[in-house]
Each structure stands twice: as C-alpha cells, then as structure tokens.
Amino acid sequence: MKDLTHYIDGARVPGQSGRFSDVYNPATGEVQARCPLASKEEFDDAVQIAAKAQPAWCATNPQKRARVMMEFVRLLNRDMDKLAETLSSEHGKTFPDAKGDVQRGLEVVEYCIGAPQLLKGEFTDSAGPGIDMYSMRQPLGVTGGITPFNFPAMIPMWMFAPALACGNAFILKPSERDPSVPIMLAELLEEAGLPKGLLQVVNGDKEAVDAMIDNDTVQSIGFVGSTPIAEYIYGRGCSNGKRVQCFGGAKNHMIVMPDADMDQAADALIGAGYGAAGERCMAISVAVPVGDETADKLIEKLVPRIEKLKVGPYTAGDDVDYGPVVTAAAKEKILGLIESGVEQGAELVVDGRDFKLQGYEDGFFVGPHLFDKVTPDMDIYRQEIFGPVLSTVRAKSYEEALGLAMDHEMGNGTAIFTRDGDAARDFANRINIGMVGVNVPIPVPLAYHTFGGWKKSAFGDLNQHGPDAFKFYTRTKTVTARWPSGIKEGGEFNFKAMD
Ligand code: NAD
C-alpha cells in the first residue's frame, strides 16, 4: 500500500497532519493507497506559495499563457492512456469512459487557448470631450476549487484551466477518493511550462475545505459535489466575501412522448441511466413515459436491454458496460434506497440486488435495477441515488410530465424524446432546468458553451467553462482617461516664468 502526497510548489510533498483516508480499488474492495488529509496550516502554507507565484504569471502576456495550455493539450493526448488507467483504478469506471473523462476536460483546455481573444477588454473612443473609457479583465489572484469523485480529471480541468489562463494561481482540493489523477495533471502542466506554485493540489477533507473558505487571500471558490455541501460552501464562502460558484446534485428526468422512437428512447435510457454505474450528475435517473401504453412499450424494450448489461472491472476491457460504484458506503446507500423503494410500493421490474461477480465478491458492484410505478412521494424519487437504478414515473399527459420535472427541487439536466417539434420547443422553453436535451439523453454542453443547472443543482450566477469561466476568474476594471493637452500644441521657444 502506498502513501499518496500533496503537490505543493512544484513537488510531491507528504502529508504532515498524520490524518489519512483510504483509497480503494473499487473492483476488488481492497485499500490500495492512503490519501493525506491536510491540516489548516498545510493549506495556508500553499496559499502563501501561490500568492508569491501569481504576480509574475499575471504579468506574463496572455499569449504566452495560452501557449502553456497548447502544450498541455499535447501532453494530455500523449499520456491519455496512463491517465485513464490510473483514473479507472481508483474510480472504477471503464477504461473508455475514463478516457472520456480526460477528453471532456482537455476540450476546455483547448478552449482556454483562446485566452488572448477572450480576455480582450472594451474601449470607447471619445466617451466625453477628450475622454476615453476602457475596461479590462484582470485576474483575481489566488483562486481555489473543490471537486467530486465522479470526474477526477474533467472537473478539475474545467476549473484550473480557465483560472490559470486568466492569470490566476489555483489551489485544487480534489476528492479524497480518487486523488491521483489531479496530481498527474499538475505535473503535466508544469512540464508544459507552467511555473511552479501556480497549480497546487492539496488533498483533504472538511478541514482543508474550511481552510480554503476562511483564508482571506483566496479570492474565489468553485465547488462541484452534492447539494448539502454546495449550499454550505456557498453560504460560508459568500459571507466571507468571496466569489463562489457551487454545483450540486441532480435528479434528471427524461420525458418519453407517445410518438417517440421507442428503440431510440430505450437505448438512450440504458446509456444515460446505467453508464458509469449511474454516478454522473447528468445521468438520467427518472424516465417519464406519457400514457400507460407508452410506459408498457418502454418497459418492454428496457428489460431485455438491462438484462444484457455487462458489469465488471475496468481491466476486462471492452467487455464491460459499467464498473463498480466508488465505495462500500456508496453501495450500501444505493441498496438501502432500493429497499425503501420496494417498501414504499414501487414495482421492482429488474432486481439486481443479488448481483455477484465471480472473483470480485468484495468489489463494490451493484447490479442494474429498474423500478416502475414510482410516485413523487417515494424516497427513490426525491433523493439522488447515484447508482445504476432507473425509476419510471408514469404520467397521464405531457403537462403532468412537464410538471413533475418542474416541481422536483433539482434542476441539473433533462431530456424529451419525441418526433413532435412543437412539444420539444414548448418543453425547452418552459422547463426550469439548466441543460435540456431534445432526443439527446445527456445534454452536456461542449467546452465553448457553459455548463450549469438551476434550482438546488447550482448556487451562484455564472456557469462552468465557456465564456462564463472567463468572467468568473477575472474582475472588471474600468478606466476613464483624459489627458491634458501636450506638446502637439507646438514647441515653446521662449524662456517662461513659472507662473
Ligand atoms: P461530495 O459532496 O461528497 O464531495 C465533494 C467534495 O466536497 C469532495 O472534495 C469532498 O472532499 C468535499 N466534502 C465532502 N464532505 C464535506 C464537508 N462536510 N465539508 C466540506 N467539504 C466536504 O460529492 P461526491 O460524492 O464526491 O460527488 C457526487 C456528487 O456530486 C453528486 O451529488 C453529484 O450529482 C454531484 N455532481 C454534480 C455535478 C454538477 O456539475 N452539478 C457534477 C459532478 C458531480
């Protein structure tokens, strides 16, 4: 078993606090490493290092900063397999899915190569007589981010790439469950030319997070994770006067209209409901077929597809659809919610509770589950399960289906499957959810758009990546300038009294 480290001032540094948390191989259930949990003092020391490094980086012209990002993209592609392998071994997701995790982060780095263009300010010539007005976007200084376990490459890159491209220093507090990839990313960025001290990785738990929130030098915090923690960090961070954006949990509904292509809808639900063992904030966890006939047809199409799903370790290669969940505690929580669904009267159409994988009996595997006749008062409907469990809520009409998605407290993503452009347009217009798919089950916006939910899925007013990130990681300064008339009046040849 190995002890992992922090990444401070350009080097892997062992933890000093004496506190650790276990990092598992979720496929076998074995502890494979210990992750150090930083003390407040360790975190505060990293902030001082960042604060020293940042002014020179801020003074480096944006084109040079962009070139570092360009080289970082090349190195990410070079090391793609190594990164994905490490990611799978700690997270449990399949190898192709782990590559996707790196890839969707890399695309935001590519977007950040446009920093010189994106950071251009505004200029008004002759705003008044002889007066010009211009605004510039300047970096905040030392910025920080706290990320979840489910995308250990993508989400850190969504934060630190724009933060650094804007001229900030960034301190990352990644998930303590899969902390190895973030350190590899920091090393690659330095190989790409980033001066040391600008991207540091401080591992930890609540103590490190609180140290970030309470440190006066840290100017902004980005958080992605569960809603209760998002609310906590947003409240405490804002009351400390920081710029804060927090993205929380989800309960994404997919409306299936009677005119939808049922094979297409069923295929979409399989990937969106069970991919990555349901551990995606954009996973579809609720299917809402409109009308009993639609529901019966959909269930009939879903069951054989679910029964064919291949669950296994990432080492089994292409032969696996999804892997284990991240910890034994996550597995226990998922199975507990499944029991509550049965007790509260939902119909368990596909029951994966007895799932066992030969040779991996201690792994955190959860078989696929499908519930029918779920109602909005049930715990499996109200809570985020974050496992391979799809709930079906039958709606009598389009309006009822729309109302269900609108009334749920979460508002990350949603989708409608239909052949009717009018229904799709109405849905996209009226729904109070941040990301909407039309015949697309996981509508994750690409890097040059922005990503963010509504309601209890996000706190703060700017989204992640795209143009919003360049606003979040900079502040505007506006200069109004008037120059006294100067030498252009003509030369002075006579010696004048100073009156
Ligand atoms: P989590 O909230 O348990 O942890 C997220 C981060 O917060 C981790 O770095 C963790 O160390 C830290 N943390 C945990 N408890 C804390 C506490 N009491 N005080 C301070 N910090 C604490 O989330 P997770 O289990 O790692 O990730 C899964 C959750 O993230 C799901 O709810 C999922 O929907 C959500 N998520 C949301 C998005 C989005 O963009 N909205 C994206 C990915 C994941």
Image: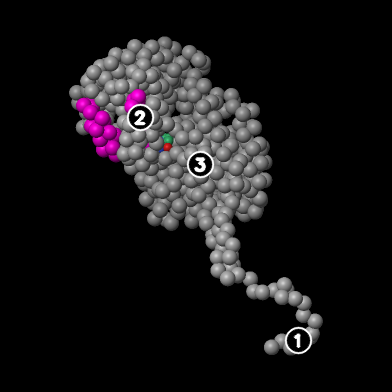
Residue 411 painted magenta: yes
Q: Residues within 10 Å of mark 2 (few under 14, many from 20)?
A: few
Q: Nearer the viewer, residue 330 or 102?
A: 102
What residue do we see at 43% from left, 56% from top? 241
Residue 348 location, quadrant: top left
* Residue position for label 1: 496
User: At numbered mark 1, what does the secondary structure look like: helix, strand or loop?
Assistant: loop
Left or right: where 495 falls relative to 250:
right
Disc 3 and disc 1 in contact, CB within 8 angstroms = no
Q: Is residue 99 visible?
A: yes
| Distance Cα–Cα, label 2 vs label 1 | 81 Å
Q: Quadrant of ligand 1?
A: top left
User: At numbered mark 3, what does the secondary structure look like: helix, strand or loop?
Assistant: helix
Check disc 2 and give the amino acid type: Gly
Disc 2 and disc 1 in contact, CB within 8 angstroms = no
Q: Residues within 10 Å of mark 1 (few under 14, many from 20)?
A: few
Residue 466 image label? 3
* Residue position for label 2: 421
What residue do we see at 57% from left, 54% from top? 121
| Distance Cα–Cα, label 3 vs label 2 | 28 Å
Residue 138 image label? none
What residue do we see at 28% from left, 37% from top? 406
Q: Give the residues in magenta.
A: 394-420
Check disc 1 and give the amino acid type: Lys
Location of residue 342 in the rendering, given as x and y in whole percent from the top left corner: 23, 22
> Disc 2 vs disc 1: which is toward the camera?
2
> Disc 3 vs disc 2: which is toward the camera?
2
Q: Nearer the viewer, residue 494 or 43?
A: 494
